[in-house]
Amino acid sequence: MPLNKFAKWKQKTLLGASVKIVAPTGQYSSTKLVNWGINRWAIKPELGYSRLWSKWMLDAYSGIWFFTSNPAFPDRSIPRPQTEQPIGSFEGHLSRNLGKPRFWASLDGNFWFGGTTTLGGIDKPDTRQTSSRVGVTLSVPVSKHQSLKCAYSKGSYVRYGGDYHNVQVAWQYSWIGWPK
């Protein structure tokens, strides 16, 4: 879309779809429990929804991770095949435009579940993941092309991992409106 049309475009409802694929890259050793790489493929199809109402915007995403088996997962230094059930995920953001371009705040949350593993053909039900995080984000314009974004999140329900506080600060630069 040409820049002049993009500047006049007004969002209402958007629907989208994406697919993320993670290849078995990096260094993997079947004799190590913790590795720099993975020894399996992962794929995540995801659907997205975005709706704008005046100064409010709702973004929501739903996806599911699928994994191939890891034929060389170590268990007491004896490689045995490990499989993992799919992991479902939901994410949402309720944002409010605060007046100027790139000046907005949002409430953020997510939830994921599943991922029970099987090692050497034996189910490990205690590996099922069920977790959620909540947070807030603020974007403040600094100049015509720049803004600062600050975010905070914390685990709200944690079964495995994710029980930490996270603070992010980002500087953003946009080339939209850059001289032709």
Image (cartoon, rainbow, N blue to C red):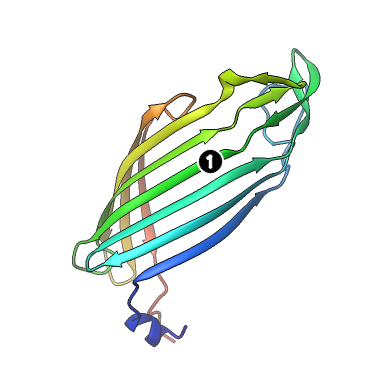
Looking at the image, is 77 positioned above or below residue 5? above
Residue reaching furthest top?
A: 76
Residue 147, located in which quarter of the rendered image?
bottom left
Q: Is residue 147 visible?
A: yes
Q: Position of residue 112 (x, y in %)?
A: 48, 37
Looking at the image, is 25 positioned above or below residue 122? below
Q: Position of residue 95 (x, y in %)?
A: 28, 56
Q: Nearer the viewer, residue 80 or 141?
A: 80
Q: Nearer the viewer, residue 88 or 29?
A: 88
Which residue: 73% across, 39% down?
Answer: 68
Q: Is residue 139 visible?
A: no
Identify the residue position indicated by label 1 in the image: 88
Q: Position of residue 83 (x, y in %)?
A: 71, 30
Looking at the image, is 29 positioned above or below residue 23? above
| Crowd tier of the residue under label 1, counting other residues whose Cα lies within 10 Å: few below 14, some 14–19, many 20 or above | some
Q: Nearer the viewer, residue 170 or 135?
A: 135
Tell me how many marks there are: 1
Of the residues shown, which amino acid type is indicated by label 1? Answer: Gly
Which residue: 50% across, 34% down?
Answer: 113
Q: Quadrant location of the C terminus?
A: bottom left
Q: Position of residue 99 (x, y in %)?
A: 18, 67
Residue 28, located in which quarter of the rendered image?
top right
Which residue: 35% across, 80% down?
Answer: 9
In the drawing, does residue 60 fall left or right of residue 104?
right
Which residue: 38% across, 49% down?
Answer: 92
Q: Nearer the viewer, residue 8 or 180?
A: 8
Question: In terms of secondary structure, where does tag 1 sit?
Answer: strand
Residue 64, located in which quarter of the rendered image?
top right
